[in-house]
Image: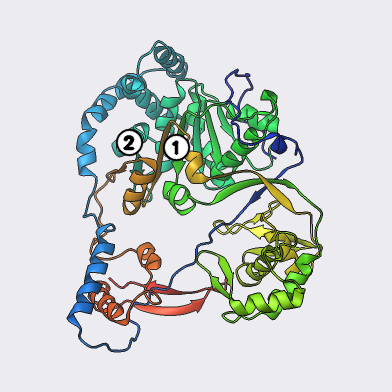
Amino acid sequence: MASPLCQSPLVKHYPSVSPFSSKFLHAHKDYRQISYVGSSKYLQMFDIGAKTSKVGGSRTRRMRAMASLGGLLGGIFKGNDTGESTRQQYASVVGVINGLEAEMSALSDSELRDKTPLLKERAKQGESLDSLLPEAFAVVREASKRVLGLRPFDVQLIGGMVLHKGEIAEMRTGEGKTLVAILPAYLNALTGKGVHVVTVNDYLARRDCEWVGQVPRFLGLKVGLIQQNMTSEQRRENYLCDITYVTNSELGFDFLRDNLATSVEELVLRSFNYCVIDEVDSILIDEARTPLIISGPAEKPSDRYYKAAKIAAAFERDIHYTVDEKQKTVLLMEQGYEDAEAILDVKDLYDPREQWASFVLNAIKAKELFLRDVNYIIRGKEVLIVDEFTGRVMQGRRWSDGLHQAVEAKEGLPIQNETVTLASISYQNFFLQFPKLCGMTGTAATESTEFESIYKLKVTIVPTNKPMIRKVSSSKPSLKFLMKCKIGENSGSGEKEVYKEIWGGLVLDAYVHHYELPQGLHCARIHLIC
């Protein structure tokens, strides 16, 4: 269990308890946090250069396929933007910061540290953070040189300014995004309202806090860290720090727990102010609709789960039911309804007095969509969920709405008590609550439309410190893009021929090896020979 990394002054500024639920929600103190996988992502197979049947040369069909391809590429390839326009936009401010470097270098450690309370006082007197930015960035740069031995480059200063403006900074891999984050974090922490630096897992949160977190600590700020096994007191103490490193899931669940609190003393978070998200495309786009759920105990387990599991085992796919693997849903067919009602000796599966439909559908989901050693593992007599994004076991979390019980019945394990949802929120709705939100990643331009339409976040490409010597052609699709494309079941053979013809000319000797993933899914490994 990690120890708190900050002092513990009590701050009287707590978040208000949202009217999240009725008295019924507050009556359940023995709640658990679970993660509900609403929509698992499956890799799609992009079959490049594979043999396809010849199709008659229909000009109309080829033109339609061309138009479809053109529309698809329109949002992907935005030209060779190297970020030079961004460099010119911030050149004057960078010049001011560089002009202060000699002055900062002449200061002793204590004199440099004394800059923080002076800047805080100026912010408290009403001076804008924009006017404090050059001096604050110069202070952080000098502190980084002394503590880490790293001097932030001019392009890293630009990245910090982009983040301070509440935008998304796209920076190439290796350009030092972790170091960039402390620049706007320090500046925005001067207001005393707190800053959250969000990462995707506990290891990165601890690494960043212990490494680059030395810089703001050297300058007199309190830096906190939230880890999975911390107590409420430790969490409250660390959230009250000037800068707090935390994962997206821990922050989200702490918010839900605060909404179930019955008194102010139980709250751990304070009001949201400024948030910097690392790997922002993964959290705000890939996991945007992943709901976080806190559940509480419901009624005692039912033997209906075992009966439904036997029915699901006997039913056959596409005869009794259909499966949509992308949406993770199942649908009973007419034959399935008739056979299920006959086996259960009921007139209607949806009879509200019996409600057999939910048991049967969950049993089929458990059979078809939730695979052992892929979506979950068996440890002892317990079903443990495996996080689809990190591959880690999520101890103590359960699927809701009877799905976890259906998996237990399928495996012949003792069924634990059912749960009811007490509080739930998606990452998308959660992060929209921050008054000032920004992020950084190496691949944001391809999702710029989604960032702007959903989060009102502009994507700015930050130039590299040194000129790129690797040849990058905008006419060639990235591997990430190829894996997202869907060629096959939803494309006509004529369209596939056009894709094959065009991609064949672009990626040259692209070839495909089919293999089976541990998940039991099929995809293609694509080798691009440039």
Q: Answer whether labels 1 and 2 touch (C-beta < 8 Å).
A: no
Picture coordinates of residue 125, whole percent (x, y): 40, 10
Picture mark count:
2
Q: CA distance from mark 1 to mark 2?
A: 11 Å
User: Is 59 situated above or below 480?
Assistant: below
Measuring from the top left, give residue 400's x and y in whole percent.
Answer: 67, 54
Q: In the rendered image, which residue does mark 2 sit on?
A: 162
Amino acid on which disc 1 is placed: Val
* Residue at image point 65% right, 43% down: 228
Residue at position x 61%, y 28% in the image: 17
Identify the secondary structure beneath mark 1. strand
Dot 2 falls on a residue whose secondary structure is: helix
Asked whether residue 134 is in view, the answer is yes
Which residue is more in the foreground, 69 or 300? 300
**In this rendering, is residue 493 above or below 451?**
below
According to the picture, the residue beneath numbered tag 1 turns out to be: 276
Crowdedness of circle 1 by 10 Å Cα count: few (<14), some, many (20+)? many
